[in-house]
Image (tube, coloured by chain):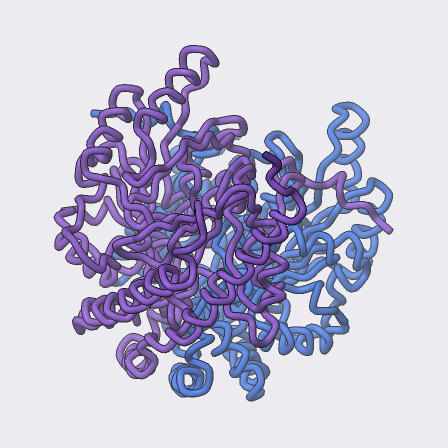
Chain colours: A blue, B purple
Amino acid sequence: MLSYEQFYSRSAKSMKKSAIDEILRLISKPGVISFAGGLPAPDLFPRQEIKGIAGFVMDTEGATALQYGATEGNMALREQLLKFMAKEGIHLTMEEIFIITSSQQGLDLVAKILIDPGDVVLCGRPTYVGAIQAFHSYQAIMRPVALDEGGISIDGLERELDSLINTQCKKPKFIYVIPDFQNPSGITLTLERRKRLVELAEKYDLLIVEDSPYRQLRFEGEPIPPIIGLNAQRVLSIYTFSKILLPGFRLGWMIGPKELIKKAVMAKQAADICPSPFNQAIFAEFIKRGLLEKQIQKIIVAYKEKRDYMLDRLETYMADIEGIKWTKPSGGLFLWLTLPDPLDATEMFLNAVEKKVAYVVGSAFDPEGTDRRTMRLNFSYASLEEIDKGIQRLSEVIKEKLEQNQVESPITP
Amino acid sequence: MLSYEQFYSRSAKSMKKSAIDEILRLISKPGVISFAGGLPAPDLFPRQEIKGIAGFVMDTEGATALQYGATEGNMALREQLLKFMAKEGIHLTMEEIFIITSSQQGLDLVAKILIDPGDVVLCGRPTYVGAIQAFHSYQAIMRPVALDEGGISIDGLERELDSLINTQCKKPKFIYVIPDFQNPSGITLTLERRKRLVELAEKYDLLIVEDSPYRQLRFEGEPIPPIIGLNAQRVLSIYTFSKILLPGFRLGWMIGPKELIKKAVMAKQAADICPSPFNQAIFAEFIKRGLLEKQIQKIIVAYKEKRDYMLDRLETYMADIEGIKWTKPSGGLFLWLTLPDPLDATEMFLNAVEKKVAYVVGSAFDPEGTDRRTMRLNFSYASLEEIDKGIQRLSEVIKEKLEQNQVESPITP
């Protein structure tokens, strides 16, 4: 047999299958209630509308929708998105936006245009696992800074920056943040910290990469301005249709300073030439008909109910577990649970799957993989009935583990 | 204004807009007959079938088609493609195939898993411009070897390999070839050379990347086995739906040794998570209904007629131009024209556009950019009437240039 190891790039040598991917495989058994994936609720997908619009697009613009398109994306879709962003208070020109084949591609392109091997990226601990994969694939060094209930710690970032620049002569290229209903924690970055983050970027001459897949899925309270709204020069923002409409079309968009957008478009051309004109035409018409706003409202109502119910069930089944805690997100798809000492979420995972409930271990979201006590729970995919059963099962696993721990290591006076 | 240059990766610093992209912009004026793009004929797109199947997919599997999917692609589509490849004599398992978001992504992933900055890739001169972009974006050094009427010169490759390995201590990672109806030249690699190419890969311990976008579009003669059919261990082959069905879905597939496929799938996960499940479901059903074979036959009949007509018109309008020559491809979308000395295709380009005819300058397909006398002519997109007018206009431009040259630099005895 030929050994392929000798042919691999350094990037390939360091690649690992995503922990999430492995988890999803493990839990595909029947009967397992999964809080693991980041999947939107499929019963909300506007199937009939998509069917109708796909037919309409074939009838009215089939020749262009089935052909190659511009690398920066379909003009009609970009126009709709400029209006969509304007409602958020972000006013852009056509040169400041382009269409990406999923927000994951946005992360890949950002890394491609900004990262050389060994470059440092600052990020939250925890942070989105797909960003870790994308940045690592360009051999970035990721330096995580802890989150608290207000989001990533700005003091922590400043300490890390000082240490990197002053003692290691290593200036990071950018800070990566997910300000709204962060994946995996569900935490939202406060306005005051957004402002300080921008000041930090100016002071240390850095860029900010703002990943915003969940921003529109706010269940309550006033929206906080996106970071790009606070500084248009230093921020690249990545958006996706996956959570506010559907993931099956693999479409998102990136906005930012036109020089950076131009570079990212060039990188995209070499990566896949153009986003699907067919899929773009359908989404452009979907937004034009006013259906996106309605879809977002529908999703918010459904996910809010599920979040409320998951919080309620956690309270019901776990309030008596000393030392356990979980976040209470105001939007998005996830909450973050911290087990009481000395439980280990990774160690407990197989017990949970045995009891037919699944989560993602927190270590998957830690660039250094050291976090052992946490887990991500998704509330968008499971039904209310499953949420009830699943949280009950999870509480039983935790309690059993705690009992085992007490037997195994009795507290001696 | 903030200067972004300081933030760019080395890859970004070296990125240029594709020459083709610039050309396509330049020639979008009304009335210009374009032989420049590599666009399929839009009148052949099966719009009604796609419309019907899109509706069928929404009715029967909307929940999965609009959701996230597996990184390696939709099982139904991969099954159909295994059968499709089996008809080519290539028998594969599920682990030896995965779905890519366009063959351009295939090139990007190949580079990502195999290329470190400074690694050498051998390729033809000329070769596909998108491959140059993709490989350059990973900072590969491309060493072109001339093509003749039998395809890439194997002797030339061996000389280059000897020189690289023995005098420069630089072993290339792989040889990149487009064996059938090569883009841009239309030339097909002979069976004897395919065999020698494989021997060369074995002798020098290299991989081969076989790019096969046009293979099924053979107008006459017997198909020559794909290179992967001659050696399953050392070849990664990239296929796409763009030319045999339609480009607007951005889908293709890659086949090869399972270890390499596994790595490429990991790289794809970090690049865009998964190909569009919606688009894949439509294509799977399209093939299942037996429509792909019919579509390919329809395309072959139409493109053969266009190729015949373009060759006929070239003969009619240009046979009297001394020193001019063009290839006579047995399939695909392109032919390759070499101007008589001392004409320069790049210099002549604006004159051509003034006369409302366009082509792609040969230098775009030369990794070193030195080729000045050649141009690529696409025969799939223009109508027969446009082919007649366009080739006539082109002949006039060439003849005028030749006359100007004679006036400007008279031949002195």
In the rendered view, tell whether residue A217 sits above or below residue A149. Answer: below
Residue under the image location 56 percent in, 60 percent down: B397
Residue under the image location 43 percent in, 77 percent down: A63
B109 with respect to A179 (left or right): left
Q: Residue furthest top?
A: B167
Residue under the image location 75 percent in, 60 percent down: A228
Rendering quarter of residue B154: top left
| Image coordinates for residue B151, horizontal then vertical, percent | 31, 39
A371 with respect to B184 (left or right): right
Question: As rendered, which of A136 and B45 lies closer to the eye?
Answer: B45
| Image coordinates for residue B189, horizontal then vertical, percent | 27, 41
Q: Is residue B101 something that shows in the picture? A: no
Question: As rendered, which of B354 and B233 lies closer to the eye?
Answer: B354
Question: As rendered, which of B153 and B320 lies closer to the eye?
Answer: B320
In the rendered view, tell whether residue B225 sits above or below residue B395. Answer: above
Question: As rendered, which of B334 and A143 lies closer to the eye?
Answer: B334
In the rendered view, tell whether residue B79 sits above or below residue A166. Answer: below
**Quadrant into which the C terminus of chain B falls:** top right
Q: Is residue B122 something that shows in the picture? A: yes
Q: Residue furthest front?
A: B413
Rendering quarter of residue B172: top left
| Image coordinates for residue A369, horizontal then vertical, percent | 51, 36
| Image coordinates for residue B194, horizontal then vertical, percent | 23, 35
